[in-house]
Each structure stands twice: as C-alpha cells, then as structure tokens.
Amino acid sequence: MGGARLPGLASRSQKPFYPLAPAPAARREALSTRQEKMAIDGNLYAAFEERFRAAGEAAAFTIPGASDVSYADLADDVARMANALVALGIKPGDRVLAQVEKSLANVHLYLATLKTGAVFNTLNTAYTTAELGYFIGDAEPALIVVPSEKLARVEPIAAERKIAAIATMEADGSGSLTDLAQRQSADHATVARASDDLAALLYTSGTTGRSKGAMITHRNLASNAEVLHACWGFEAGDVLLHALPIFHTHGLFVAMNTAFLNTSRVIWLPKFDIEAVMRLMPEATVMMGVPTFYTRLLGHPAFGADHCARMRLVISGSAPLLAETHAAFEARTGHRILERYGMTEAGMITSNPYRGGDRVAGTVGYALPGISVRAATQEGAAVAPGEVGVLEVKGPNVFKGYWRNPEKTQEEFRPDGYFITGDLATIAGDGRVTIVGRAKDLIITGGFNVYPKEIEEELNSLPGIGESAVVGVPHPDFGEGVVAILTPQPGMTAPGEAEILAALSCRLARFKLPKRVFVAKELPRNAMGKVQKAELRSQFAKTFSE
C-alpha cells in the first residue's frame, strides 16, 4: 500500500487506512450500528423517512419570501411525488432522467425516485440538446423531466428511443409532474432495495471523451452520509446554508444527505447570490461552497466576521482552494475553511479535520474512516511517502462501476479492488493527502515530468496575479511545452511575461519554467468552478507551431 503506515502497524499486508481522526469507542460503535442498519434497510430513503417523520413540524427548508416547509410536509410531498412516478409507470431499477433547475420540487423528485426504488439520473442544466440526446440514448430512462421550453427538442429524441413518459418541471418547481404529484395520496410504502442496488446514475464531466455513467448505490450514499455526519460534527440545531446546484455530487449528496440525516433546517437559495448569502449567513451554522463562493465574499468590502458569527463549519470543495484564499478568509472572519476531496465515482474521500488536528491550506486532509487511500505509479506500484503518485481509493463509498461499460470499469479498478482516481497526489508519513493535479494534466517536457500545480502556486504568489492555469501543449523540440494562462488581480495590471519568468527563474528549475505566458480576462470553468484545462489545451494547442 502506498503512503506511510500509521504508528503501530506492522506491515503493509495489514491494509491500513488513513483515518480522519481517532474517534471515541462509543462514537465508532454508534456509527457502525447506524451503517449496519442502513445496509439492512437497503433503501437510503427508509432512513431519511424515519427521521423526517420523527422531526414532524420542525422546519426542513427556509425559502426566502415563502413559508418554512416542515419535515412532515416534506415526507408527504415526497410520497405524493413517488405516487406520481408510479402513475407514470416507473418501476424499481428504472432510470428517471432530470435536466431541471434547482427547486424544492426537484428535491422531491430525487427523494421520490429513491423511495420508489428507481435510479435518479440528474444532468447538468448547461448540457445542450445534442448532449442530452447522448445521455438519453445511453441511460435509456423510463421518464424524462425537462422544463417546458426544452420539450419540443426533447420529444423527437424520446420518440426515436421509444420513451413514452415525458414530464415538465420549471425553475420555480411548477409543471406537469408537480401537478400530477399534487393530485396523489400522501400514502406510499417505500420500496425495499438491497444496499447494492443503484440509487443514482451520474455522468462524469467527459473531459477525456464521452461522459461515462457512474453507478452509485444506496450503500455508497448511505455510508458516505453517515461518515460525514459524524466527522463534521453535525448536531441538533445545525442550519445549512445551501447555494450550490443540485445536479452535482456536492450540492445533492454531500450537502443534502448530511442535512437530511441530521434533520437540519436548510436555507434554500436557487443559486449563489452574494447579497442573499451575506444576508442569510448569520442564521446558518454550516456552509458548503466552491472556492468561487469564498473569493466573491472576500471581494465584497462589507463582508466580515459578523456574517459568520454563528458559523461553526465552513467547507470548500469541488475545485482546489488557493492557500491565499484560505488565509484571507481566516484573517477576515476568524474561520479556517475546511477543505475536503471527493469525486463523482466515490463521493467524499478525504477531509481536513473538523476537530483534533490542523486544517492545512493546500491539502485535503486524511482519508475518511473506513476508506483506504494509497499513491501508486501508473503501473500500480506503491510510491514512498511524500512522492507523487496516482491516488487510489477503496471503501464502501466507491461506486459500482461505469454504466454498461465493463471494459472501462475493469480498466479503472486494480485487481485488489482499489479505484484509480486519476488524480496525482502525495501522501505524507502521517497520511495527510495533497492533490497536485490530474494524471492527464501531467506535462512531460524534454523527458522531465512537470506538475502544473507547483508552477501555479508560484505564479499565484506573484503580485498582480489573481489566478493561473498551467497546461502542456505540443512542442516540436520538447514534446510538450509549458504554457501559463493567468488572470490579473481585480483592479491591477498583471506583470509582463519577461517579468514573470524572471521572478520564477529563482524559484523553479529551468525545465519547469513556462515557455509562454498569456493573460486572460477569466479562466474557463465548469458549473462547479473547476478550471477546464482540456479547453485551454485546445485553445493554445498551436502556440509553438505557428
């Protein structure tokens, strides 16, 4: 196993995992008991429903400008939506494909899909009709849910694929599916499912070809939610500020599932609106966001410690958080952002400690309890502590495989069951993980390996530079040439190429220095804030051939 052993472990054959922090025996036993119960119940919604009914009239959602929604009402609305799905012919195992905006009705649809034993297939709302056609053809859903404005373009695709059931859901939650649900009974028996049955089908971003459907089971979601609930210290009275999209693992599974297990009140925003977030933050105790949330808050002159007065936990994920942002947020508010690491195929994998350890900027902490991580070569050989390797992970959180793609599934798993994440990382002697980039982003120039993050960190530390991205593009002499694309700090002029190279020349080996530096107004990002390096590689592909 790659990475360092924890003290007291005699050999690698014992397959240790790197824990977040030692937990008291009582907490470990309680966590194990809850996970076993979930495994027996199988259907994740059975655990949610038990908690919803027990919470009764306690507030589940606070929606600005509307009355609070209680957990009892939420359970009834989910039951009605489940009966609507049954009325449309949905059976256990059927895929329910939804490309709709964030709304409470969309939450009902997610939970009702689980309740009926079907498989929730949510899609990024930015996908085009052509892309949607691919997903429909691949997933073969029994029901398609889209806003009415997309209906005319989707109906021919559905007809070609012989998909009879199409329903609408608008951004405000209205639509034919919601209308049908409102006419249904609030009595519905949750369908029994095995813990290994599929709960969701999520498509990866597809940066290296066609998107692949990750098969997520009830056990995957249940185990991850339980571990996060315990490790992040969720407690009675917690209030979650939710401004993330819910077509993604972060906003849907990480944020919502942990809140549901805790029956927390969720302050529900359709999107990140800085004025709304700043107005509502003083009511919340927990906030989950992407780095862009925090840079925008820090860019607002009125933002400060008062906004975080009740906050006990501020979490960042889905994209790397700059160390500078981490430090600036702490200086402004007194809170150290907790950075964690996960992916579609495995949910959350590591986390900086909530308590009992340091939250180190630029790292993603330790493997969560019950999850094993290691760093290895491309061939699967373990690397020494502190050396760069491809991060591999094993645990109950790891997905079942790629939908109808056994060859790709076999390719991405080691014979001993470890999933190859494709992320490059170092694991320190105590198990702390630092992500240094994607394996596909590794630049090989003149026979030397160059890790973009190392150069980006140096660039980002220079005056006048807001953010940078480093990619490798074809070079006639070196195979790949290092190219840096950067944005200026707001209100400042970025330094010139010669000035930047002069500053880096005493910090980096010559082969790591960018051969060209470009300034851009902004870096291309996906919906979760990740810089799209594939797009940059394409944009600057001819830099050294023209």
Image (tube, helix red, strand yellow):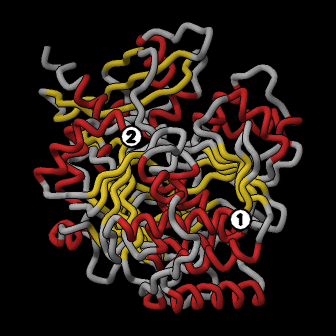
Instruction: Tell me which amino acid carries mark 1.
Output: Tyr
Q: Position of residue 287 (x, y in %)?
A: 70, 48
* Quadrant housing the C terminus: top left
Q: Position of residue 398 (x, y in %)?
A: 41, 72
Residue carrying label 2? 147
Answer above or below: position of 158 versus 234.
above
Secondary structure under tag 2 reads loop
In the rendered structure, the answer to whether residue 450 lies left or right of residue 370 reads left
Q: Position of residue 344 (x, y in %)?
A: 41, 59
Task: Name the residue at 34% across, 41% down.
Answer: 450
Task: Name the residue at 77% across, 84% down.
Answer: 24
Task: Name the residue at 71% across, 88% down.
Answer: 30
Q: Position of residue 194 (x, y in %)?
A: 42, 87
Closer to the N terminus: mark 1 or mark 2?
A: 1
Residue 84 or 356: which is nearer the viewer? Answer: 84
State which quadrant residue 269 falls in: top right
Answer above or below: position of 281 versus 79.
above
Instruction: Tell me which amino acid carries mark 2.
Output: Pro
Is residue 384 shown to the viewer in this render?
no
Residue carrying label 1? 71
